[in-house]
Image (cartoon, coloured by chain):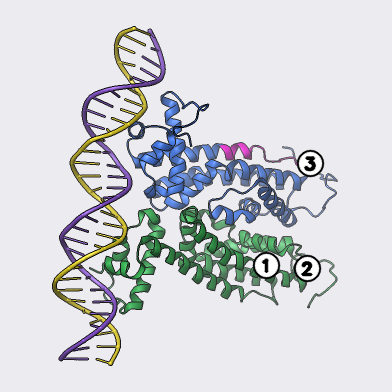
Chain colours: A green, B blue, C purple, D yellow
Amino acid sequence: MKLNVSPDIIPPRGHEAKRVSIMDAAGEVFCRESFAGANIDMIAAEAGVSRQTIYNHHGDKEKLFVAIVRDLTERCNAGIFATISTFPDQPKDLEADLIAFAVRMNRKCICNRDGKFLRKLIQTEGERYPELFAEWREQGPGRTWPAIAARFARLAHAGFLDIEDPDVAARQFLALANAELQTTFMLGGTPTDDEVLQSATHGVRTFVRAFGKRQPAAHAQKHSALAGG
Amino acid sequence: MKLNVSPDIIPPRGHEAKRVSIMDAAGEVFCRESFAGANIDMIAAEAGVSRQTIYNHHGDKEKLFVAIVRDLTERCNAGIFATISTFPDQPKDLEADLIAFAVRMNRKCICNRDGKFLRKLIQTEGERYPELFAEWREQGPGRTWPAIAARFARLAHAGFLDIEDPDVAARQFLALANAELQTTFMLGGTPTDDEVLQSATHGVRTFVRAFGKRQPAAHAQKHSALAGG
DNA sequence: AGAAATTTAGACACTCTTGTCTAATTCGTC
DNA sequence: GACGAATTAGACAAGAGTGTCTAAATTTCT
C-alpha cells in the first residue's frame, strides 16, 4: 500500500533510496503536524515504506527528528553559501543587481521546501531541543550572517555603498527584502514569484536609498570618487 | 507555577477567576507543547484547577484552543491599537520619536507574553485551522497594517517624510525595527530591553536615511506647511 | 539460481490521552 | 448555618501511538 502515487513515478529502490524517501516524508509530516502530532504510520505511508523500515533505519521517532533537522540545516546552509557566492561584488547596476540577489536568496533558500521546513521546525520545536537548535544557530546564522556581512563590507569598501556597520546592514537588507512576505511566512504559505519580486524590489530600493552613494540615476548630484577599487 | 505551594499567593477564587486562570495556563502550555503535545492534565495543573473544571468551562480541547487564539488576537489587537495611538504625528525629533514608537510597539505588542504566544500559535497551528487563522488575518494584520500605514501617510503629508507608498513604508518600518531580533524570535526567546532598543535604533536610523527629508540634524527649521489638519 | 540482507504486514504489549461519570467537598450567598 | 452551584479527586472505557517481534516476501549481489 504505497499510497496513491502517479503510475509513472516508479517507487525508488535500494537501501539508500528508502533512506532519502523516509527523510523526505518525515520532514513533510513533522513540519505539517509538529513532532507530537506526527505519527510513524503517517510518515511510513507518505514515504511508501513499512513502519518497521523506519525503525530499522533511524531507531526511534526522536532520532529520526534530529536527523531531519541536521539534514535540513546542512542542505539549507549549502544553498545559502552557493547563493552568497553570486553576490554582486562589481555591480553594473547596483539596485538591479541587489534585487536579483535578494530574489535568488529568497527563492532558493528561504521560500523553497527546505527553507520552509527548517524554519517551521525551528519555530515549533526549538524550545524543546535546546542543544540541537544551538547547533543550528552556530552552523546556520552563526556562519551565514558574517559571510553576507563580509560581502556588503566589500561592496562598501569598493565605494558602492555607504555603510558603517556591515552586520547591521546585512540583517537590514534581508529584513527589507522579506518585509512584505512576513504574513505569508507566518501561516506557512509560499509566496508567489511575483510577491518575492515585489518585496525584493521595494526592499532593495529602500536599502539603496539609505545606503547608496548619492549618484544613481534619479538623483544626479555632485559626488567625488568613482570608487572603482 | 502556582501549583500546590505558594503560601502568600492565594489561589484565585470565583468562577471568572478560574476561567482566566485556565486561559492563561492553556496559552502557556499550547504555546510550549503545540496543540498535539499539550494535554489537559498539564493545563489543569498549571492553572491550579481540576481537569473536570476545564471540561465544564470549555467543552473540549479544540474548543479551548480556539478560545485561546481568539482571546489572544483580541488582546494583541487592543495593545497594537493603543500603541498606534501614540504614533508621533508631530515629532519634535523625528528619529528619536520614531525610535521610541518602535520600542513601544516591540515591547508592548510583539515581545510581550501575548504577542509571543499568538505568534507561535499561528506559526505552529496556522495550517491546521484555516478558517480560524483567516479570521485572525482579517482582524489582526488586516486592520493594524492600514492603521499604521495611515499614520505614516499623515507624517509624509505633513512634510516629515518622503514616502511614495505608505503601506510599503509601514511594513519596512517594522521589518527594520525588528531586523536584529529575528533569530531570537525564531527560537521563541524574548529579547532584552537593550536588544530591542538597539534594533529599533539601527532600524529607524536606516528608515530615516531612506525616507527622511534631506535636511538632517537641523530639524525644526522651515517646514512651510504646518500641516496640522 | 542461490545466499544474504532487507523489507514487509500484522500482531502485540504498553503507555498515554481524551472525555465521561460519580460521589464528596468547597464556595458564594443568603 | 444552610442551601444550591461549582469544584474536586479519582475511576473508567475507548482510542491512538510507540516500539518490538515474527514469519514471509522481496530485493541485491555473486
Front in this rendered view, residue B63 or A136: A136
Say which residue label 2 marks. Answer: A215
Left or right relative to A54: residue B188: right
Q: Is residue B159 visible?
A: no
Placement of B117 over or under A29, stated as above or below: above
Quarter placement of the N terminus of chain A: bottom left
Residue B219, visible in the rendered structure: yes
Chain of residue at mark 3: B
Foreground of the two, A69 or A103: A69
Residue type at numbered disc 1: Ala
Q: Secondary structure at mark 2?
A: loop
The magenta stretch is B79-92
Q: Return the x and y of residue B52 as percentages of the image width and height.
A: 32, 33
Nearest to N terminus: mark 1 or mark 2 = 1
Between B90 and A142, the one lying in front of the other is A142
Q: Are marks 1 and 2 in contact (CB under 8 Å)?
A: no
What is the C-alpha distance between the residues marked 1 and 2?
23 Å
Amino acid type at mark 2: Gln
Badge 1: few (under 14), some or many (20 or more) residues near its Cα, within 10 Å?
Answer: some
Q: Is residue D4 left or right of residue B119?
A: left
Secondary structure type for disc 3:
loop
Q: Is residue B81 within the magenta segment?
A: yes
Q: Are marks 1 and 3 on the same chain?
A: no
Image coordinates of residue B136 in percent, x first then y, are: 47, 44
Measuring 55% from the left and 66% from the top, which residue is drawn there?
A106
Question: Would residue B78 be counted in the magenta stretch?
Answer: no
Q: Residues within 10 Å of mark 3 (few under 14, many from 20)?
A: few
Q: Nearer the viewer, mark 3 or mark 2?
A: 3
Identify residue type, mark 3. Lys
Q: Residue A149, which numbered label?
A: 1
Name the residue carrying label 3. B92
Task: Residue D20 in the image: state x and y as whole percent.
Answer: 26, 63
